[in-house]
Image (spheres, helix red, strand yellow):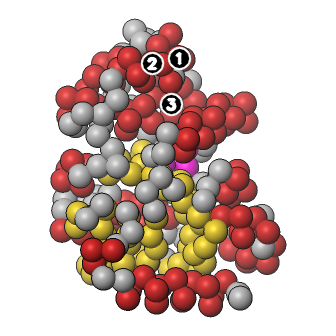
């Protein structure tokens, strides 16, 4: 069975499911635009609770735009399609409502708040959300952040700021975590540390979508993989199958 057949079969199976049997997270034929630019061109996939999905594809394939659409950012604008999280219709929500529904996006730029300490960043994440992880629980899992709790957050290294960005997401009440290129711009030794954290997140059973240029690194700890090209899904299946499929990697991932 080739990749394209596999994808269309998955899509077919999904659309026949009655709504009460929707997967934990379900993206159904979403189309999104930046002004006149049609970017997300009919993306569908789903994730079971606790699974990690790698969202892959070359630069400009539409990965960030897809995550932004799923998190209900103001742009790109979702014009059609449905997004369901644990029975909740995200497609009818604005970003703050999606956040309240349990969607947490850690964007590429990490958005650490300047002028605040590590601990203040964590406490602020908690007041804006409902009940997520306590600061103590975060420090248990991220001892590095505990050591630096009184440091101004933006003076930390890139890797530590990435840790804080993930911790802030956990401090909110999250049902699904989107990580957009968490290794971007980090030295290899720091990448290993972040990878450890992502593995911890997986082991905690937090449903996660990870976008990564380093496809192999992401695939190694993912259950599922979706590959995008020019705003569409060209593959959807098991992460292990992508690792084994050299042709697929060559055609869409440049690895
Ligand atoms: N704010 C924007 N306005 C218009 N086009 C955009 C905007 N952001 C991204 N794009 C375009 O959308 C396409 C997909 O970009 P993006 O989702 O960032 O890809 P990826 O994350 O896979 O590298 C690209 O062609 C990019 O130029
Ligand atoms: Mg991107």
- Residue in view at x 54 percent, y 89 percent: 8
Distance from the alpha carbon under mark 2 to that under mark 1: 5 Å
Callout 2 touching callout 1 (CB < 8 Å): yes
Front position in the image: 239 or 117: 239
Instruction: Check disc 3: other Cα within 10 Å, few if <14, some if 14-19, many if 20+.
Output: many
Residue 153 visible in the picture: no
Segment colored magenta: 178-182
Residue in the image at 25% along x and 29% along y:
126
Dominant SS of magenta comes to strand
Q: Mark 3 or mark 2: which is in front?
A: 2
Return the residue at label 2. Answer: 139
Question: In the rendered image of this protein, does residue 73 appear above or below residue 9?
Answer: above
Residue 163 percent across, percent down from the top left: 50, 30
Which quarter of the figure is the C terminus placed in? bottom right
Residue linked to disc 1: 143
- Quadrant of residue 138 within the rendered picture: top left
Looking at the image, residue 253 lies above or below residue 79: above
> Element type at marker 3?
helix
Q: Marks 3 and 1: CB-CB under 8 Å?
A: no
Could you say which disc has been placed on residue 163 in the image?
A: 3
> What is the secondary structure assignment of the residue under circle 2?
helix
Establish if 159 lies above or below 144. below
Q: Is residue 141 left or right of residue 124?
A: right
């Amino acid at each position: 069975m080739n990749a394209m057949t596999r994808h269309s079969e998955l899509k077919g199976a999904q659309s026949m499911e009655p709504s009460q049997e929707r997967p934990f997270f379900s993206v159904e034929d979403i189309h999104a635009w930046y002004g006149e630019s049609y970017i997300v061109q009919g993306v569908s996939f789903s994730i079971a609770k606790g699974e990690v999905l790698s969202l892959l594809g070359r630069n400009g394939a539409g990965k960030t735009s897809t995550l932004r659409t799923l998190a209900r950012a103001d742009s790109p604008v979702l014009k059609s399609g449905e997004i369901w999280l644990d029975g909740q219709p995200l497609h009818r929500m604005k970003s703050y409502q999606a956040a309240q529904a349990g969607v947490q996006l850690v964007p590429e730029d990490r958005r650490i708040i300047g002028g605040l300490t590590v601990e203040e960043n964590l406490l602020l994440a908690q007041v804006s959300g409902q009940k997520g992880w306590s600061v103590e629980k975060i420090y248990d899992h991220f001892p590095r952040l505990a050591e630096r709790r009184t440091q101004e957050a933006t003076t930390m290294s890139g890797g530590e700021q990435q840790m804080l960005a993930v911790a802030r997401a956990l401090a909110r009440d999250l049902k699904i975590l989107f990580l957009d290129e968490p290794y971007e711009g980090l030295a290899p030794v720091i990448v290993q540390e972040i990878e450890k954290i992502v593995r911890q997140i997986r082991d905690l059973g937090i449903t996660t979508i990870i976008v990564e240029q380093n496809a192999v690194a992401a695939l190694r700890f993912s259950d599922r993989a979706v590959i995008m090209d020019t705003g569409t899904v060209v593959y959807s299946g098991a992460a292990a199958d992508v690792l084994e499929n050299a042709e697929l990697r060559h055609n869409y991932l440049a690895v």
